[in-house]
Image (spheres, rainbow, N blue to C red):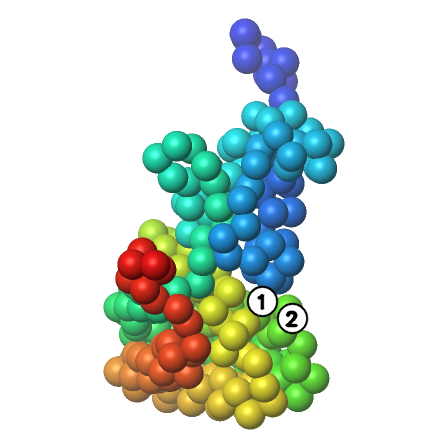
Amino acid sequence: MKSGPLAELEPINRDSIEQRVSEALRDLIVSGQLPGGTPLVQRELAQRLGVSQTPIRLGLSVLEHAGLVEVGDTGRALVRRLTREDLEEIYAARLGLEGLAARVGVEAIGEAEIGQMRVMLAELDRLARRRDVESYLQLRWDFHAVCYRASRRVRLLAEVERLFWRAERYNRLVLSSAERFRRSVAYYHEFFGACERHDSLEAERVIHKSVRGAVDLIWPTLPSELDHDEG
């Protein structure tokens, strides 16, 4: 039985107001309901969500760190715009870190993890045929995370996951047609094959190919920050 001055402390509920605020805003941003450039006025958001401005301010800080919100020198918050430069920076980071995570993960992966990935791959096929973007995006991360987690590189996994979800709005653009879904799921079949063979270099190559393929698909459709600044 606990005793002493800390005996009455209860565990803090992680599902805090700030977390719920950031999750609500994140969902609106990644779904496109709050497009890039939308002002995020703390007072208005507090009234809309029925909370004080403090959790709004903290929630916006979380989203700024996630790369979904930008705060100017005056403190004015906006939904971060989708731009060529932002795309290139996110995907360049993914190219290096996710390639590394794939390589070290495949070197350590066991048969139990490969079995989990096999089941997930069948479900990815089904979701791709249905073009279920929401479920597909979540499962594609879970699929890769099984491999990456095998490396037990906790810091690396956390950073790769942060970049993956920061890229979510761009990932949605990639998955804009049935053909693009077929191309996407084909990469996962290649990656799974590399995992089965314990071919770490091939796994890294597949990640590099899929990342570069995504950039090539949507880069021409995005505005440049340089053009915006000049205008």
Q: Residue at x 65, y 25 (%)?
A: 52
Residue 152 in view (yes/no):
no
Residue situated in front as seen by the camera: 95 or 32: 32
Give the Cα separation between the discs numbered 2 and 1: 5 Å
Q: Mark 1 points at which residue?
A: 138
Picture quarter with the N terminus: top right
Residue 87 place in picture, x, y as percent: 37, 67
Q: In this view, does 73 lie to the left or right of 2?
A: left
Which residue: 62% across, 30% down? 43
Front residue of this view, candidates 75 and 170? 75
Say if 171 sits above or below 50 in the image: below
Amino acid type, residue under disc 1 in the picture = Gln
**Residue annotated with mark 2:** 135
Give the mark count: 2
Q: In this view, does 25 lie to the left or right of 192?
A: right
Amino acid at dot 2: Ser
User: In percent of the image, x 52 and y 74: which residue is there?
Assistant: 173
Neighbor class of circle 2 (other Cα within 10 Å; few <14, some 14-19, many 20+) is: few
Q: What percent of the width, then of the height, locates residue 53? A: 60, 27
**Residue at image coords 49%, 90%:** 183
